[in-house]
């Protein structure tokens, strides 16, 4: 084998290991202020995503802008991990049907008592100074939620998991000294599961359950452009296509009262297939990086995401005495993102990152307990140390503030006679704390 073939073989073996490790980490990824996270354990956490598609300082550019690989020398591999804690706790208000639903507020909805791991792996390989190949494995889409079994909103949602794990083979080419182009195929493995309580009404039976779950693959394309206006200033433009995740599952009912079981069977609902078409939204972003002087650099980003085509549905039965449908469409709106940040060279080995960002609301007014997220502010800070010519590491933290989110769910039928009941309240002072660490090797 030639030296190039050996290098490529080693690259492929490393990529396979990255896919396995990052896939396991990505299974716990969550976000707020939307379901497409900028946080995957990299330096972008400390920058609050400022300069997301223009920074191109390490192998994580395979995800943020594949064209940025042309700025990386040799083979580089970045391993990233993070831990987050989400404060997403519902508080029921006076409009809630406590008589029929009880008074359990559901606990911390996000994760295992609010905790989640996340991260990813990123690899860039130089075929030549102008041609680069890359691979990334990470999860930046989705959010798993878990409420207490007897919480007041159990007839709307109990548990739900929507996750996307992305494998990103990538290529970049330096057209000239200023312009670089890049592309990635986004092979996304989608995981979907939703469980909701069913109001049996009948004494002695408690609640029934309805669950659907499925896994599927979706495919998309990421395109990137990097233009160096001058040696210290570069502009990044990226576009990620929509990814269709077509989930399909039979309705899995359990613990139904005999009368309701018979009604559902006669109407063909008991074993019906349920199709849920989730669309990971297309997005576009413009980013800039400018080196002001030897100590300071400024970064910024403006982005758009098409959540109006998301396609998420709410599971359940509005009236068990007259079960017409088990799904209800939810409506969302497109969002905008803006971020500003800076880097400060404290000393030769140390670099300080910090930034602030804002994402507009994806839901109008009140939020669904299925997705207790909306507009959000991000505040990040982090530091990197250059250990040698071939290694560096960094840590980063970010606080995401989602504010107080109101929920007003009004049922046509009270819970005492087979309906879902009214659930009125709020998620007060929602927020997420991210702590990330990463290590970058150069070979």
Image (cartoon, rainbow, N blue to C red):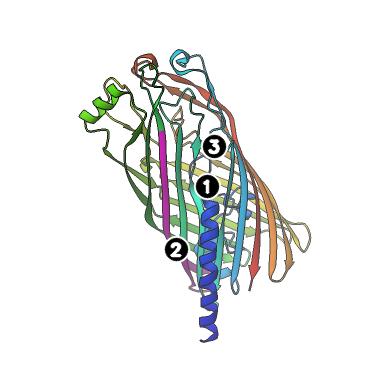
Question: Judging from the image, what secondary structure is the residue with disc 3 in?
Answer: loop
Measured Cα–Cα span from mark 3 to mark 2: 31 Å
Label placed on residue 37: 1
Question: Judging from the image, what secondary structure is the residue with disc 2 in?
Answer: strand
Q: Is residue 177 magenta?
A: yes
Question: Judging from the image, what secondary structure is the residue with disc 1 in?
Answer: loop
Q: Is residue 397 above or below residue 344?
A: above
Q: Nearer the viewer, residue 138 or 366?
A: 138
Q: Main secondary structure of the magenta part?
A: strand
Q: Nearer the viewer, residue 236 or 94?
A: 94
User: Is the residue marked by circle 1 packed among few (<14), some (14-19), or many (20+) residues within 10 Å?
Assistant: some
Instruction: Tell me if 91 is positioned left or right of 199 in this view.
Output: right
Quadrant containing the C terminus is bottom right
The region drawn magenta spans 170-195
Instruction: Please give the residue where the numbered disc 3 appears in the rendered image.
Output: 110
Q: Residue at x 59, y 47 (%)?
A: 117
Choose the circle earlier in sequence order: 3 or 1: 1
Label placed on residue 217: none
Q: Position of residue 347 (x, y in %)?
A: 79, 60
Q: Position of residue 10 (x, y in %)?
A: 55, 75
Q: Is residue 136 above or below residue 145?
A: below
Measured Cα–Cα span from mark 3 to mark 1: 15 Å
Depth check, mark 3 against mark 1: the one in front is 3
Residue 22 figure quarter: bottom right
Instruction: Tell me if 232 is positioned left or right of 252 in this view.
Output: right
Measured Cα–Cα span from mark 2 to mark 1: 18 Å
Q: Is residue 151 visible?
A: yes
Q: Residue at x 40, y 36 (%)?
A: 332
Q: Position of residue 193 (x, y in %)?
A: 41, 41
Choose the circle earlier in sequence order: 2 or 1: 1
Farthest residue in the bottom direction?
Answer: 2
């Amino acid at each position: 084998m030639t030296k190039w073939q050996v290098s490529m073989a080693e690259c492929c073996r490393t990529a396979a290991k990255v896919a396995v490790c990052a896939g396991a980490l990505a299974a716990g990824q969550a976000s707020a202020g939307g379901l497409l996270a900028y946080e995957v354990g990299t330096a972008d956490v400390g920058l609050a995503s400022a300069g997301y598609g223009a920074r191109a300082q390490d192998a994580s550019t395979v995800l943020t802008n594949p064209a940025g690989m042309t700025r990386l020398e040799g083979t580089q591999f970045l391993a990233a991990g993070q831990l987050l804690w989400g404060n997403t706790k519902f508080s029921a208000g006076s409009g809630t049907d406590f008589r029929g639903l009880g008074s359990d507020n559901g606990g911390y909805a996000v994760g295992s008592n609010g905790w989640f791991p996340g991260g990813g792996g990123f690899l860039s390989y130089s075929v030549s100074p102008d041609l680069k190949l890359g691979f990334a494995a990470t999860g930046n889409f989705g959010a798993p939620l878990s409420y207490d079994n007897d919480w007041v909103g159990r007839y709307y949602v109990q548990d739900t998991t929507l996750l996307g794990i992305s494998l990103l083979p990538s290529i970049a080419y330096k057209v000239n000294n200023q312009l670089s182009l890049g592309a990635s195929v986004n092979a996304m493995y989608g995981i979907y599961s939703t469980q909701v309580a069913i109001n049996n009404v009948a004494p002695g039976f408690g609640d029934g359950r309805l669950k659907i779950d499925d896994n599927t693959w979706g495919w998309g394309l990421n395109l990137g452009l990097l233009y160096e206006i001058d040696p210290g200033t570069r502009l990044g433009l990226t576009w990620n296509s929509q990814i269709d995740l077509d989930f399909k599952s039979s309705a899995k009912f359990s613990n139904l009262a005999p009368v309701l079981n018979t009604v559902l069977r006669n109407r063909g609902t008991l074993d019906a297939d349920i199709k849920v078409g989730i669309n990971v939204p297309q997005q576009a972003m413009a980013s800039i990086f400018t080196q002001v002087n030897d100590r300071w650099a400024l970064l910024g980003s403006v982005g758009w995401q098409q959540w109006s085509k998301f396609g998420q549905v709410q599971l359940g039965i509005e009236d068990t005495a007259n079960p017409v449908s088990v799904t209800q469409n939810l409506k969302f709106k497109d969002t905008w993102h803006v971020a500003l940040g800076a880097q400060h060279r404290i000393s030769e080995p140390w670099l300080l990152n910090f930034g602030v960002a804002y994402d507009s609301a994806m839901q109008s007014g009140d939020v669904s307990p299925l997705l207790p997220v909306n507009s959000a502010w991000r505040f990040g800070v982090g530091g990197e140390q250059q250990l040698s010519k071939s290694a560096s590491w960094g840590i980063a933290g970010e606080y995401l503030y989602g504010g107080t989110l109101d929920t007003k769910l009004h049922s046509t039928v009270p819970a005492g006679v087979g309906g879902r009941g009214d659930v009125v309240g709020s998620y007060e002072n929602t927020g997420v704390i991210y702590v990330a660490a990463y290590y970058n090797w150069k070979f």
